[in-house]
Structures are given as structure tokens and as C-alpha cells.
Amino acid sequence: PRGAKIKALLVSKLENVFFPCVNSVTASTFSNFLCVNLH
């Protein structure tokens, strides 16, 4: 069980680091897409 707990901790840390990056990239891509289509 200890190994699983450590693994879960690592995964949650990775998600905390990774998802904000993905979200910001997605948001900027989406806003660029909107700008291109609107102008």
C-alpha cells in the first residue's frame, strides 16, 4: 500500500504542474482562434 500512496502523491503533483500548463496553452490557442475568426 505504501508504494501506491507514493505513486498517488507523485501523480497528483504531476497533475498540479501539468494541467495549468495545458489549460493556459488551450486558452491562448482558443483566444487566438477567436481573434483570427472575428477579424
Image (spheres, rainbow, N blue to C red):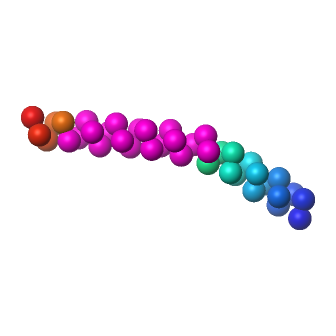
Query: In percent of the image, x 27 and y 39: which residue is there?
Result: 31
- At which x and y percent is residue 26? 38, 43
Magenta part of the protein: which range? 16-34
Q: Is residue 19 magenta?
A: yes
Quadrant, the C terminus: top left
Res 38 quadrant in image? top left
Q: Position of residue 28 (x, y in %)?
A: 34, 36
Looking at the picture, does residue 33 appear above or below residue 7? Answer: above
The N terminus lies in quadrant: bottom right
Q: Residue at x 87, y 57 (%)?
A: 3
Residue 27, horizontal then vertical, whole percent: 36, 41
Task: Write down the quadrant of residue 34 in the picture.
Answer: top left
Task: Say left or right for 17 vs 30.
Answer: right
Magenta residues: mostly which secondary structure? helix
Q: Residue at x 25, y 36 (%)?
A: 32
Query: Residue 15: image x %, image y %?
Result: 61, 48
Q: Quadrant of residue 23?
A: top left
Q: Residue furthest bottom?
A: 1
Which residue lies most toward the right here?
2
Drawn side of residue 1 relative to residue 16, left or right: right
**Figure label count:** 0
Please indicate whether residue 30 sits to the left or right of residue 24 in the image.
left
Q: Is residue 27 magenta?
A: yes
Question: Residue at position x 82%, y 60% from top?
Answer: 4
